[in-house]
Amino acid sequence: MKIRDLSVGSARVKVEGKIINKSEPKKIKLWNGQDASVADALLEDGSGSIILSLWGEQIQMVDVGDNIQIINGYVSNFKKEKRLNLGRFGKIIKV
């Protein structure tokens, strides 16, 4: 699947791309009161780009310049931006 083909609500997404940019992790408070770390990465392929939300351990799994594959991701809308998420069942694989 190409990034240009992703739409909000897409599930079981399998896509490959290159990490172009990665923000510094931020500490946030979750709805259940727990603390979490989150960072955004920009994933790009020849067709377009999308923000990839990285949580906890996922943040250290990728660096700028890495070519990765996302397996079993899903696309959501957060703050009027389309985002690719991994959730509990998604995986990041360096290629």
Image (cartoon, rainbow, N blue to C red):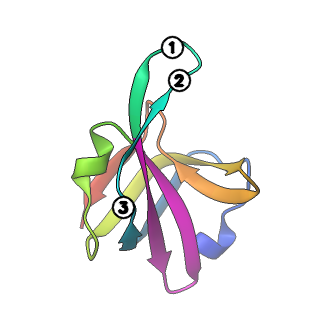
Say left or right for 51 vs 34: right
**Whether residue 41 can be seen here:** yes
Residue visible at 56% across and 67% down? 50
Q: Is residue 19 above or below residue 55?
A: below
Residues in magenta, as a range: 38-54
Query: Mark 2 to mark 3: distance in Å?
Result: 27 Å
Question: At which x and y percent is residue 66?
Answer: 26, 71
Q: CA distance from mark 3 to mark 1?
A: 32 Å
Q: The residue tagged with tag 2: helix, strand or loop?
A: loop
Q: Name the amino acid, label 2.
A: Leu
Which is the main secondary structure of the residues drawn in magenta? strand
From what the image shows, is residue 63 above or below residue 11? below
The residue tagged with tag 1: helix, strand or loop?
loop
Answer yes or no: do the residues labelled 1 and 2 have beta carbons within 8 Å?
yes
Is 88 in front, or is 13?
A: 88
Residue 30 has which mark? Answer: 2
The quadrant the C terminus occupies is bottom left
In percent of the image, x 45 and y 69: which residue is there? 43
Q: Quadrant of the N terminus?
A: bottom right
**Amino acid at dot 1:** Gly
Question: Crowdedness of circle 2 by 10 Å Cα count: few (<14), some, many (20+)?
Answer: few
Mark nearer the N terminus (2 vs 3): 2
